[in-house]
Image: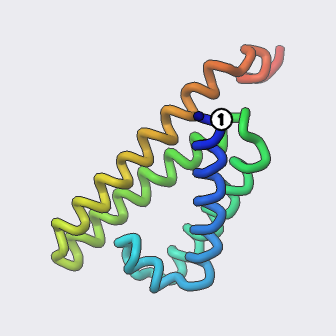
Amino acid sequence: MSKTLWMALGALSLISGIAIIGLPLALASLYGLPRWRSVLRLIGVRDVIIGTGLLISSDWPWFMWARCASDAIDALLIVVEGFRSGQLIVAALKFAVGCGVVVISGTLAWNAMKAIPPSRVGPSG
């Protein structure tokens, strides 16, 4: 099950990243992110890199940790936009969804870390 979820998050990251690069302001409204075109495009590039990494290496946790961290950043940006726009209830709901994804990706990354032999986790010596 976690392998399927891993691949789904990879595909979601890749597709979302491409969409944000192409239509940054439309996706900002959908996700509840601030409407900062340059930042949104950087978020899109970040998501394309993370999504590609997840799809290519489903047993290596570093891209999933990156996904977890990026989701946490996005959740904070949603709160910022909620305060800026005065749509606190909508922002709170989107923040809750974002936090749920952070928990999922963090759990997947943690489980992947436990499955890696110690020689692959750190520098060899």
Q: Is residue 116 above or below residue 23?
A: above
Q: Residue at x 47, y 78 (%)?
A: 27
Position in image of residue 6 (x %, y %): 62, 43
Residue 63 x %, y %: 65, 44
Mark 1 closeness class: few <14, some 14–19, many ≥20 residues within 10 Å: many
Across and down, in percent, residue 37 comes to 50, 83
45 left or right, relative to 53? left
Q: Which residue is mark 1?
A: 61
Judged left or right of residue 32, residue 58 is right
Q: Nearer the viewer, residue 36 or 51?
A: 51
The total of numbered circles placed on residues is 1
Mark 1: which amino acid? Answer: Pro
Residue under the point 76% across and 42% down: 57
Would residue 61 be found to the left or right of residue 82 on screen? right
Q: Position of residue 5 (x, y in %)?
A: 58, 43
Q: Is residue 114 above or below residue 50?
A: above
Helix, strand or loop at mark 1: loop
Q: Quadrant of the C terminus?
A: top right
Q: Is residue 123 above or below residue 25?
A: above
Identify which residue is drawn at 55% across, 34% down. Answer: 108
Q: Residue at x 42, y 39 (%)?
A: 103
**Quadrant of res 20:** bottom right
Which image quadrant: the N terminus? top right
Instruction: Tell whether 89 sits left or right of 114.
Output: left
